[in-house]
Image (cartoon, rainbow, N blue to C red):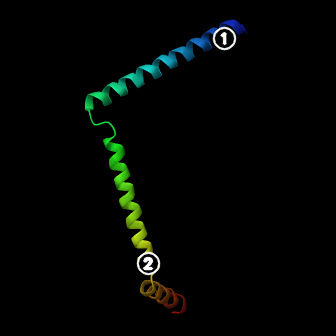
Amino acid sequence: MDFARYHRRDAARRELMRRRIRWTLRQATKEMRERGDLGMATAEYAVALLAAVGLATVLYKVVTGGAVRAALQAAVMKALHG
C-alpha cells in the first residue's frame, strides 16, 4: 500500500468536507440574515419552557396535596384490596 497516495487522498477528502461545511454554514447564516428575525425562535422556546415548568410545578403541588393524595391512596387501596 502506498502510504503517500493514501494520505493525499485522505487529505483531499478532508478538504472537500471542510469546503462543504463552510458553504453550508455560509448559506445558513445568509438565510437567517435575510429572514430578519434572529433569536426570535430562541425567545419563543424559552417562554414555552418557562410556561411548561410553571404548569408542571402547579400540577405537582396539586397531585401531592392532601385531598388528591388521599383520593389516589383510596383508589389504590380499593384496587389492591377489592
Q: Quadrant of the N terminus?
A: top right
User: What x and y, as percent, mark residue 4?
Assistant: 69, 6
Task: Say few, some or many: other residues with alpha carbon within 10 Å of mark 2 (under 14 / 14 to 19 / 20 or more).
Answer: some
Q: Secondary structure at mark 2?
A: helix
Task: Give above or below for 26 relative to 48.
Answer: above
> Alpha carbon of mark 1 to alpha carbon of mark 2: how far?
64 Å
User: What x and y, as percent, mark residue 52?
Assistant: 38, 61
Q: Residue furthest bottom?
A: 82
Task: Say few, some or many: other residues with alpha carbon within 10 Å of mark 1 (under 14 / 14 to 19 / 20 or more).
Answer: few
- Name the residue located 66 percent from the left edge and 11 percent from the top edge: 7
- The quadrant where residue 10 appears: top right
User: What x and y, as percent, mark residue 16?
Assistant: 51, 15
Name the residue that disc number 1 marks. 6
Name the residue that disc number 2 marks. 63
Q: Amino acid at mark 2?
A: Val
Q: Nearer the viewer, residue 65 or 75?
A: 65
Q: Nearer the viewer, residue 36 or 14?
A: 36
Q: Nearer the viewer, residue 22 or 58?
A: 58
Q: Amino acid at mark 1?
A: Tyr
Task: Give above or below for 2 relative to 63.
Answer: above
Task: Give above or below for 71 relative to 57.
Answer: below
- State left or right for residue 40 relative to residue 10: left
- The quadrant where residue 40 appears: top left
User: What x and y, as percent, mark residue 53?
Assistant: 41, 62
